[in-house]
Amino acid sequence: MTTLHPSPSTAPSARHTSFTFKAAAFAVPLVISMAIFVVVFRARVREVAQIEKQLEFEKERGEKLAAVALQNADYQRLLEDLERRINTIQALQNSRTGPVEFMRAVGKLAMQTADVDLYSFTPQDRRCVFRGRSHSVEAMARFLASLQSSRSFSEVHLREFYRDSGQNSTTYRFEFDCAYVQSPR
């Protein structure tokens, strides 16, 4: 039997062409796939770098916010302390409006007017009744006028006024009432 063999000159080149074609058919998609992989990989690396950068920024921001929160807590404690102090001062001022402020106001006006002596004070309803003496009518009139014009007293009414002659001097006795006005806080 006779077998036909392909000629040696045509067989290797067809094999070679067939191999080259198969290698090229395998290599081209491989190169394209590698190129796509490299492009996608680089894009992902950039995204990861941006995310890491943003994460670092957010961590720094979180640290700053934590510092602000601590500072805010300090300010809150300071505010509570100041409010407590203000309330204490207001309580002390409110407790001071009793006879201390009243006597201070009366004493200030009495010291401004010479020749007037107050020797009696009686609270009556919401008014104050005073008894006193003066060495002149003018001194007593100045005292009552200063009471009326002060911010601490209002509605000054002279109830009684008479001359008291005794032991080598003449004095004038008087009685008046007025309303005490507490100073605003």
Image (cartoon, rainbow, N blue to C red):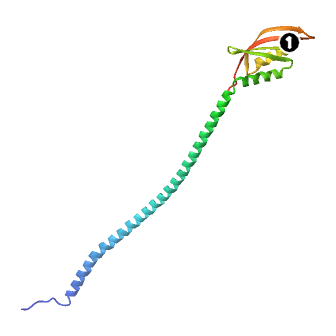
Q: Where does residue 66 sit, x and y in percent of width and height?
A: 53, 51
Quarter holding the N terminus is bottom left
Horizontal side of 51 relative to 165 (left or right) equals left
Against 162, is 25 above or below?
A: below
Q: Residue furthest right?
A: 168
Q: The C terminus lies in which quarter of the figure?
A: top right
Q: Which amino acid, by three-letter code, is at mark 1?
A: Val
**Disc 1 residue crowd, few under 14, some 14–19, many 20+, Cα 10 Å:** some
Please say whether residue 42 is visible from this viewpoint: yes
Displayed quadrant of residue 39? bottom left
Residue at 79% in and 23% down? 107
The image quarter in which residue 101 lies? top right
Asked if 122 appears above or below 105 in the picture, the reply is above
Q: Nearer the viewer, residue 79 or 100?
A: 100
- Which x, y percent locates residue 176? 77, 12
Is residue 182 placed above or below 177 in the rendered structure? Answer: below
Q: Tell me what residue is drawn at x 61 percent, y 40 percent.
A: 81
Image side of residue 147 versus residue 29, left or right = right
Residue 166 percent across, percent down from the top left: 90, 9
Residue underneath mark 1: 137
Q: Which residue lies furthest to the bottom in this view?
A: 1
Query: x%, y% of residue 109?
Result: 79, 21
